[in-house]
Image: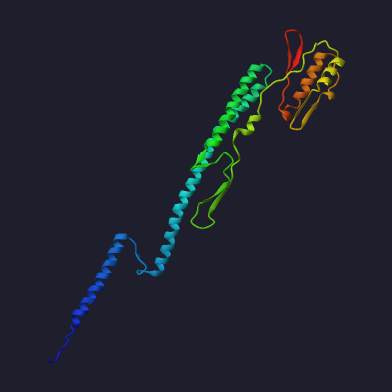
């Protein structure tokens, strides 16, 4: 018995057209729902490649923006702490100016020194405890960093390490006074010179020395001690040392 294969050409064409229509409808629905003309590389390979590069750039810039904000936060943390340190340094300067006044007694200067020491300790505490994300940034251990603020290699900002802001260097600030041996205001100039020479009195700070031998002669001991104080005070800007002449109740003068 013979076999016969019948082909329905019209049905095949109808199925092919239906498949094409469904594919076009699916593409149209994707474009309508996404608002994009190119939803995959099959829509337009060239435009798809461009869009992919742009998406990569956008994502990189998004992360770079977060990196920049982190860097700003680190700077703001350091700025806040340094602002407090600056306020304390201003107060320490006020105390230094106050201590140079001749009206202060030894106990006054001791109180000023005590407050200065407390301020130095607080500066040291701030420097050692200021951290950002577990990194100390003011104790001298922060060696700097590179902040990636762009989507591409080389788009960065570098900062150097912050100097040590601890109070170790401030411990050398001292408000104190010292006195030479009291002498009679009526002592002759020659006698006063011998007292100074025997005591080897001089002021030497940071390499600057005041030689009392360069002082001109005086007609009285009271004038002489005034010259000594004037010689020391003439170099106050270089040495930070200030001299005061005090007359005691017994009539003697002391140089502080």
Quadrant position of the C terminus in the picture: top right
Q: Going by the image, does 246 lie left or right of 148? A: right
Q: Going by the image, does 14 lie left or right of 142? A: left
User: Can residue 82 be seen?
Assistant: no
The vertical placement of 132 against 25, above or below, is above
Q: Going by the image, does 51 lie left or right of 212? A: left
Q: Relative to the observer, which residue lies in front, 47 or 251?
A: 251
Name the residue located 79 percent from the left edge and 13 percent from the top edge.
183
The vertical placement of 105 against 151, above or below, is above
Where is residue 242, by image quadrant?
top right
Name the residue located 55 percent from the left edge and 41 percent from the top edge.
137
Quadrant position of the N terminus in the picture: bottom left
Q: Give the x, y percent position of residue 103.
A: 67, 16
In the picture as drawn, the residue positioned furthest to the top comes out as 250
The vertical placement of 255 against 239, above or below, is above
In the picture as drawn, the residue positioned furthest to the right comes out as 190
Q: Give the x, y percent position of residue 42.
A: 35, 70
Q: Relative to the observer, which residue lies in front, 109 or 16?
A: 109
Q: Give the x, y percent position of residue 50.
A: 43, 65
Q: Give the x, y percent position of residue 142.
A: 57, 43
Q: Going by the image, does 25 lie left or right of 108? A: left
């Amino acid at each position: 018995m013979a076999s016969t294969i019948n082909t329905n050409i019209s049905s095949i064409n109808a199925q092919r057209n239906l498949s094409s229509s469904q594919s076009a409808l699916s593409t149209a629905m994707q474009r309508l729902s996404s608002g994009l003309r190119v939803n995959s590389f099959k829509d337009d390979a060239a435009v798809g490649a461009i869009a992919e590069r742009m998406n990569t750039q956008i994502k990189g810039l998004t992360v770079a923006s977060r990196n920049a904000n982190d860097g700003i936060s680190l700077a703001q943390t350091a700025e806040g702490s340094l602002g407090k340190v600056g306020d304390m340094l201003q107060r320490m300067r006020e105390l230094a100016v106050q201590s140079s006044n001749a009206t202060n007694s030894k106990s006054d200067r001791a109180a000023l020194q005590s407050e200065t020491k407390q301020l130095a300790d607080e500066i040291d505490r701030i420097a050692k405890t200021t951290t950002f994300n577990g990194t100390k940034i003011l104790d001298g251990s922060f060696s700097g960093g590179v902040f990636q603020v762009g989507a591409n290699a080389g788009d960065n900002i570098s900062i150097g390490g912050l100097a040590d802001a601890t109070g170790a260097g401030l411990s050398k600030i001292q408000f104190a006074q010292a006195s030479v041996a009291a002498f009679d205001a009526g002592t002759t100039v020659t006698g006063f010179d011998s007292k100074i020479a025997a005591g080897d009195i001089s002021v030497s700070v940071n390499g600057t020395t005041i030689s009392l031998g360069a002082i001109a002669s005086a007609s009285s001991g009271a004038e002489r001690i005034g010259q000594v104080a004037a010689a020391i005070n003439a170099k106050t800007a270089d040495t930070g040392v200030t001299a005061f002449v005090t007359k005691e109740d017994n009539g003697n003068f002391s140089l502080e």
